[in-house]
Amino acid sequence: MRSWQRLKEYARTHGWGYTLRRLGEKAGQVYLGTWDRQWRREKASPEELERQRAHPPAAGLISVVIPVYNTRQVFLRELLDSLKAQSYPEWEAVLYDGGSTLRETAELLDRAAGEDPRFRVFHGKENRGIAGNTNAAIAEARGAYIALCDHDDILTPDALWRMAEAIQRDHPDLLYSDEDMMTENGKHHMDPHFKPDFQPETLAADNYISHLGVIRAELLRDVGGFREGYDGSQDHELYLRIARRTDRIVHVPYILYTWRKLSTSLSRQHLDQCLWAGCRANEDLSPIPVTAIPVDQKIRLWYDFPRDKTVEAIVFGSAEEECRAAFEDLEAQAPWPALRATLAVTDLEGLRDTLNQAAAESEADYLLFLDAAGMVETRHFFRELLMYAQMDGVGGVTPVLTDQKGSITFGGWVGGRNDQMGLLSGAGGPRDRMNKVHNVDGVSPCCMMVRRDQFVPFGRSDPSRRYVYTPHAVFLCEDMAVIQMDGTV
């Protein structure tokens, strides 16, 4: 019954069409091994692993810290075997057993330590929880970098070599890799997660970093390791704290970690607890005061935002009457006390120069570019955009753009593509990304807001700027004016 309830809840927020499609994808991965085949093609070959062993990066000792408590023997053995198979030679595994009551767990740990001195085992008298057990392991780690690993997961043979290569090259404070999942019986890989480079707004709403995370030991200890009281989102809280201290964060774009999909995991049995912990972490750590609560099994954030700032709506279209009507509709649908208008009559060929000139002449605090052919569908439209446009470094915020049937026409450029196009609004897509606030590579002038002093003229690019998509503001737009990643219209 619980599975049926989860299915109905998923269908409520995503629609039955998308739900059935996802069920088909999951069934293919679990029963037909559809991801297994690609995983086998892409994993490091024996020849590549030999090359890595012959050329180890100069990164020094990496400590893999593993909190252990009553781990099933088969799972723990597979983890230990994956460590022994590493192509990078300079590693140690610090395993802290939090008073396991299963005799087989302690016996396997002691046997591993006796066979290989790189396994350093410590037995605690009581279970301190995930955070406490991990902190105890961190205290014993000797490496300059510390890798975080769960007691029932698996590292690929090249995991530490790839991390060491990035350490030697970039000397980062935090590294993270792509990951996938494994069925509980270990027969099939599934749900690959190909992650973006570091994205602060994405991290606030969703712990996309997760595994494999490797942190400079000095920084990890300086920030105090894991904090008690955030079980279920303890790594999310830690990454948020680290992101406030440093921007030396590197994404290593390889699947290096396999997370075992267990029905007994905290995130499956007590999802609400994990989400509330993630919400508390945001409220505790955000540089802008924020209220956070779980909504539809996601972290929903409401930042304080400036209510006394002026907004200039630069409404563009082919006729003045059309632009004026669009502005009047904006005033009616989403009122804002300090709203003014610039009506930019232009065709597509002259659009870029017209918008840039209007922005240059504006004295407003914020600029809202708006296609007169579209329509605002959200009453709290300004709040949802201003919350992110106020942030330093944000070069543009886009709502979700949909057609009259509710299908997405635009949700931000990602990798130069608009892959979300045609997806039913609310369906979410992979990892429910389109239902969460996240960073994108670029936005469209069809509907975007930016703080005036952060605006980069269309046709130019600035790598210091980042762009934000929010699904909580909706703009009805059938045909959009196209802006490429480099800012050209």
Image (tube, rainbow, N blue to C red):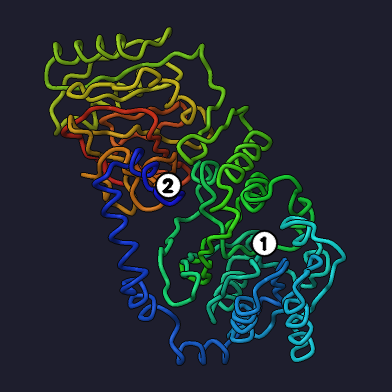
Outermost residue on the front side: it is 1
Whether the residues at callouts 2 and 1 have beta carbons within 8 Å, the answer is no
* Secondary structure found at label 2: helix
390 vs 40, nearest the viewer = 40
Q: Amino acid at mark 1?
A: Ile
Name the residue tied to disc 1. Answer: 215
Question: In the drawing, does residue 410 fall left or right of residue 149?
Answer: left
Question: In the drawing, does residue 445 fall left or right of residue 318?
Answer: right
Residue 222 screen position, x and y as percent: 79, 53
Q: Is residue 1 above or below residue 173?
A: above
109 vs 57, nearest the viewer = 109
Residue at position x 53%, y 21% from top?
Answer: 305
Residue 12 screen position, x and y as percent: 34, 38
* Secondary structure found at label 1: strand
* Location of residue 328 (image quadrant): top left
Residue 32 screen position, x and y as percent: 31, 74
Name the residue tied to disc 2. Answer: 6
Number of numbered discs: 2
Q: Amino acid at mark 2?
A: Arg
Q: Residues within 10 Å of mark 1 (few under 14, many from 20)?
A: many
Residue 23 screen position, x and y as percent: 31, 57
* Location of residue 102 (image quadrant): bottom right
* Quadrant position of the C terminus in the picture: top left
